[in-house]
Image (cartoon, grey):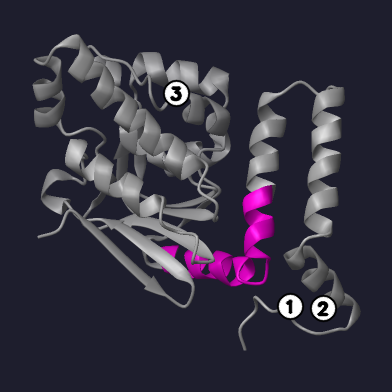
Amino acid sequence: MSALLVSTHDGVRTITLNRPERHNAFDDGLIAELTAAFRAVDDVHAVVLQSTGKSFSAGGDLAWMRRMADNGPAENLADAKALSGLMETIDSCPRPVIGVVQGAAYGGGVGLVACCDLAVAAEGATFCLSEVKLGIVPAAISPYVVRAMGGRAARRYAVTAEPFDAARAKECGLVHEVAAADGLAAVRDAWLERLKGNGPGAMGAAKEIIRRAADQPLDQDLRDWTASRIADIRAGDEGREGLSAFLEKRKPSWVKG
């Protein structure tokens, strides 16, 4: 049975964690597969990240982490960089990423959720930055978790390792919507329908701009860079097509039907 399922339909790439017997915990092999899957999304309009079974992801597989702990410093560092690279690949994906959380998201699973542009959780979903209970730390995922839920909340949950529910995850900003388990698909599909009306290149550029604006002081360099981005994009093929379609009261070329 494949640990990762990837399919494409109607402009949507669906990436599914498929280790339900291991609560979709990831190891070095799955990290490599996930990274490759997210690097190959330029031909789609949006990406869905989901999982099979009762858990979204338990984070790092314990057998894998134990194996890494027994390795030397160089191999340990290379392995840690691979996990960090996965988080950055999802976070900087050139297409919007929707996370669908149907159950527990622990440790690195919280990191996966934090890297998604939109996330919906089932009412019964639980979240936990559980690393300190094992004597380790949520290091590779921390930049994305802090950006998603804020430093104050992240500090609390990183040191207590206490579980929190979907309502609290929404309150913190880790997820955007909470739905009944049988309503997750409806939320996902409503988002996808809205995303399909937007320029694919423009959405990627908007992600890039927001990421940079969130991490930089509002100075002249940032203002100059944002001005140059809108000037370039407005004069590009997609920008010209979008503006022309609006003025001509027609659908832009990227909208099917």
Q: Is residue 99 left or right of residue 236?
A: left
Instruction: Quickly name the residue at label 1.
Output: 252
Q: Which mark is residue 125?
A: none
Image x and y of residue 113, in percent: 43, 42
- Please name whichever residue, 22 or 162, is drawn nearer the observer in this view of the structure: 22
88 lies above or below 248: above
Q: Could you tell me the amino acid type at mark 1?
A: Pro
The Cα atoms of the two marked residues, 2 and 1, are separated by 5 Å
Give the magenta part as a residue range: 184-205
67 lies above or below 206: above
Contact (Cβ within 8 Å) of mark 2 with mark 1: yes
Q: Residue at x 19, y 19 (%)?
A: 75
Residue 190 magenta: yes
Q: Residue at x 54, y 67 (%)?
A: 192
Q: Could you tell me the amino acid type at mark 2?
A: Ala
Instruction: Quickly name the residue at label 2.
Output: 245
SS for callout 3: helix
- Is most of the magenta stretch helix, strand or loop? helix
The nearer-to-camera label among 3 and 2 is 2
Residue 216 magenta: no
Quadrant containing the N terminus is bottom left
SS for callout 2: helix
Mark before the other along the chain sequence, 3 or 2: 3
Mark before the other along the chain sequence, 1 or 3: 3
The Cα atoms of the two marked residues, 3 and 2, are separated by 42 Å
Q: Residue at x 49, y 73 (%)?
A: 11
Residue 238 seen in the figure: yes
Q: Could you tell me the amino acid type at mark 3?
A: Ser
Image x and y of residue 160, in percent: 36, 16
Instruction: Quickly name the residue at label 3.
Output: 142
- Please name whichever residue, 170 or 119, is drawn nearer the observer in this view of the structure: 119
